[in-house]
Image: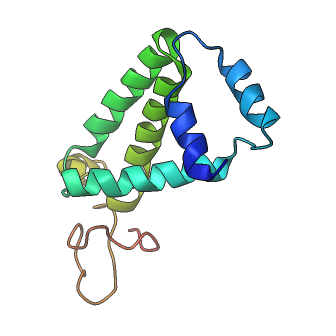
Amino acid sequence: MTNESITLEALKLADGQDAQEYVDELRGKGDPINLDHFLRDVTNEVFTARKKFPAPDGLMCALTEEVGELAKAHMEETWGHVYREAVQVAAMAVRIALEGDPTLLTIRQQRGAGSGPKCPHVGCPDSFKAVPPCALCYE
């Protein structure tokens, strides 16, 4: 099984299938479920989200919404659905870490927390000019 097929299998979990049973089933095929698969899916979701919503405005609200959907899925849905929601939560967290949320800029400044990510490289000297700003430079 390839990494892609494992992910597809995870997303096609039968309703009601126990998560541990599914993981054991895949491992029995000689294919471990690992962090690399999950992080690849998160990376793909970050790129998809940036295409759909290029501006980082409202990322904190989006993250909060996704966390709620993950909690609900964890209690009521198949493991494939839980996995997809967890990927979306992680993708929103990545975007916040790299891009910030400019809608919260005033609040950050009022509390003395600075203005968020900045990049010193050519072409993006101010907050939120680059999409995304350089992850290595934070105020």
Structure colour scheme: rainbow
Which of the 4 image quarters holds residue 89? top left
Q: Above or below — where is 22 with respect to 122? A: above
In this rendering, would 129 be left or right of 43?
left
Foreground pick, 121 / 88: 88
In the figure, residue 13 lies in which quadrant? top right
Image x and y of residue 85, in percent? 43, 31
Residue drawn at point x = 74 percent, y = 27 percent: 25
Q: Quadrant of residue 117?
A: bottom left
37 or 131: which is nearer to us? 37
Q: Is residue 62 above or below residue 100?
A: above
> As rendered, which of 108 and 14 lies closer to the eye?
14
Looking at the picture, does residue 104 appear above or below residue 14?
Answer: below
Which one is nearer the viewer's eye here, 35 or 66? 35
Residue positioned 24% across, 69% down in the render: 127
- Residue 96 seen in render: no
Please tell me which residue is depicted at 35% across the width and 37% down the height of the picture. 63
Residue located at (26% from left, 35% from top): 61
Image coordinates for residue 46, horizontal then vertical, percent: 37, 53
Q: Locate residue 93 relative to residue 28 in the image: left or right.
A: left
Give the residue furthest to the bottom.
122
The count of marks equals: 0
Q: Is 130 displayed left or right of 70 in the figure? A: left
